Image (cartoon, helix red, strand yellow):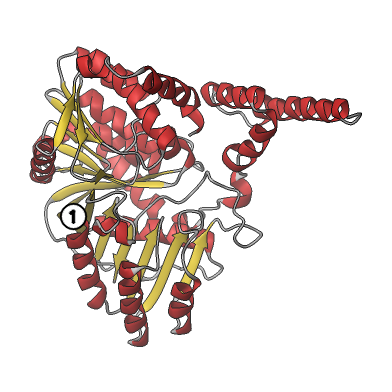
């Protein structure tokens, strides 16, 4: 027992040293700083290991070098479009979209997100339909296939995808697959070997130094992007796995939203893939015209907006706020997690108090319990402000969709939570088109018919146990 005082002293000194690091060296925001200090105070030993897994920052200089962007001509195109907007010489195909000039100017200036107006967009809300379309496009590939997914499983769906990739590689098509090492931590090595054995390339994003021991829960690549022959692109919420086809009893039917895009926006999905690939692989992709074969296919306006911990600004979150503040009639939101920071929460409250119809739809079951209880806590705030809240009952809702006034919308990978806004690499399509927004609205209204409304009266009847879970989860929400 004589060693106990020394152990206690070591724990206290370690906690003080770690707290000093959090406060003075890592420059976290105030809310996450206080959350981590609470964890260290109340669970000193376990808190230390939790911080190593969830909290430690990474070095942008060491990990993230996006020099490829200038080589791909992005900067030059951005400057040309900025000049045309500033000089009022930019021509809008849909004149009514000029009212959102400040929104896409912000994305253009802060994220190099070029605005394109010649896209064709197909919307998929069902996993079976989405993957049938994707596999059909993969089968028709002639030059290259680029896939980036947060989660890839070598189950039934993963095997079907792998079969196609192997077949196309044997036909001479270049295959590149990028997966997140944490999200795809259960990925069977057979998937990787099969593709590499036929000349395809497979890389992991941010892998651990010691195989199978990845201590980095944060800073994950949460994007889901596919590009075929530089002509067809996909972006949205579906990963590759049987659960996304509704085949897992735990979740039931999987309700998500994914886009199939043809047109110049595919150039920018391709550029995003190349940037991420060149970070993860030693075999850099250099600029080549064959990667940029997209031709005008429609008249949908769009920007591909990405964000991550390497960004100076929280581009997607800022885009959400700008959309919310532009609303005159309604804001309809679907998200599996609703943990807004104060800026976004204030924007929604102001919209509610201004008479804007705000509807928020969340799932009826958690895939991450703490996040779910924190979501319910913030939902209470929105109910008080006058928002309508719907609980989706027909399976699991994973869509990340915002629709404003039937004119603009956002679909992608970013949830409304701290992890998506600050800790993960995300990608969203911001859409400026009343037809596409109308189709998304139709799907939303159909989902309402499959949901139950959470009223303020029902919310206030929740049990003491639920209130306690909400309170603890809300305190921890800045680090969830």
Residue at left offset 14%, top offset 49%: 300
Above or below 138: residue 377:
above
* Image location (x, y in percent) of residue 106: 33, 34
**Residue position for label 1:** 126
Q: Is residue 461 left or right of residue 20?
A: left
* Image location (x, y in percent) of residue 70: 46, 55
Residue at left offset 15%, top offset 20%: 356
In this figure, what is the number of numbered marks? 1
Seen from the viewer's position, the closer of residues 473 and 60 is: 473
Identify the image quadrant of residue 213.
bottom right
- Is residue 456 visible in the rendered image? The answer is yes
Q: Is residue 396 left or right of residue 194?
A: left
* Image location (x, y in percent) of residue 202: 47, 70
Seen from the viewer's position, the closer of residues 176 and 33 is: 33
- Residue extending farthest to the front is 1
> Could you tell me which secondary element the residue under label 1 belongs to?
strand
- Label 1 CA crowd tier, 10 Å (few <14, some 14–19, many 20+): some
- Is residue 289 visible in the rendered image? The answer is no
Above or below 326: residue 311:
below
Residue at left offset 71%, top offset 25%: 20
Q: Is residue 8 left or right of residue 368?
A: right
């Amino acid at each position: 027992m004589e060693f106990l005082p020394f152990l206690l002293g070591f724990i206290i000194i370690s906690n003080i040293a770690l707290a000093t690091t959090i406060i003075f060296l890592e420059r976290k925001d105030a809310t996450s700083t206080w959350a981590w200090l609470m964890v260290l105070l109340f669970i000193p030993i376990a808190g230390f290991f939790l911080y190593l897994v969830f909290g430690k920052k990474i070095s942008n200089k060491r990990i993230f070098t996006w020099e490829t962007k200038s080589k791909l001509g992005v900067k030059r195109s951005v400057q040309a479009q900025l000049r045309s907007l500033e000089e009022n010489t930019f021509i809008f195909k849909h004149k009514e979209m000029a009212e959102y000039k400040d929104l896409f100017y912000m994305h253009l200036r802060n994220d190099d997100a070029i605005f394109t107006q010649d896209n064709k967009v197909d919307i998929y809300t069902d996993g079976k339909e989405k993957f049938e379309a994707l596999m059909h496009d993969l089968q028709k590939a002639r030059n290259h296939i680029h896939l980036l997914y947060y989660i890839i499983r070598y189950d039934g769906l993963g095997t079907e995808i792998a079969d196609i990739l192997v077949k196309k590689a044997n036909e001479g098509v270049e295959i590149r697959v990028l997966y997140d090492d944490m999200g795809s931590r259960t990925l069977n090595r057979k998937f990787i070997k099969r593709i590499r054995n036929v000349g395809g390339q497979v890389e992991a994003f941010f892998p651990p130094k010691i195989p199978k021991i990845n201590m980095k829960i944060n800073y994950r690549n949460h994007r889901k992007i596919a590009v075929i022959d530089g002509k067809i692109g996909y972006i949205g919420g579906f990963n590759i796995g049987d659960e996304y086809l509704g085949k897992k009893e735990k979740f039931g039917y999987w309700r998500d939203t994914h886009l199939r895009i043809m047109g110049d926006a595919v150039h920018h999905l391709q550029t995003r893939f190349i940037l991420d690939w060149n970070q993860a692989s030693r075999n850099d992709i250099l600029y080549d015209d064959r990667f940029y074969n997209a031709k005008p296919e429609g008249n949908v306006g769009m920007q591909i907006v990405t964000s991550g911990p390497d960004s100076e600004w929280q581009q997607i979150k800022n885009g959400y706020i700008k959309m919310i503040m532009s609303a005159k009639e309604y804001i309809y939101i679907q998200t599996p997690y609703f943990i807004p920071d104060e800026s976004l929460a204030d924007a929604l409250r102001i919209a509610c108090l201004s008479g804007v119809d705000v509807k928020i739809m969340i799932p009826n079951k958690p895939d991450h319990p703490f996040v779910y209880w924190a979501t319910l806590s913030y939902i209470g705030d929105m109910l008080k402000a006058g928002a309508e809240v719907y609980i989706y009952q027909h399976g699991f809702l994973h869509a990340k969709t915002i629709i404003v006034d039937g004119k603009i919308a956002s679909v992608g990978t970013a949830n409304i939570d701290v992890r998506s806004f600050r800790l993960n690499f995300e990608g969203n399509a911001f859409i400026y088109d009343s037809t596409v927004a109308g189709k998304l609205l139709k799907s939303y209204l159909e989902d309402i018919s499959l949901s139950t409304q959470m009223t303020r009266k029902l919310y206030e009847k929740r049990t003491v146990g639920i209130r306690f879970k909400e309170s603890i989860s809300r305190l921890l929400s800045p680090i969830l």
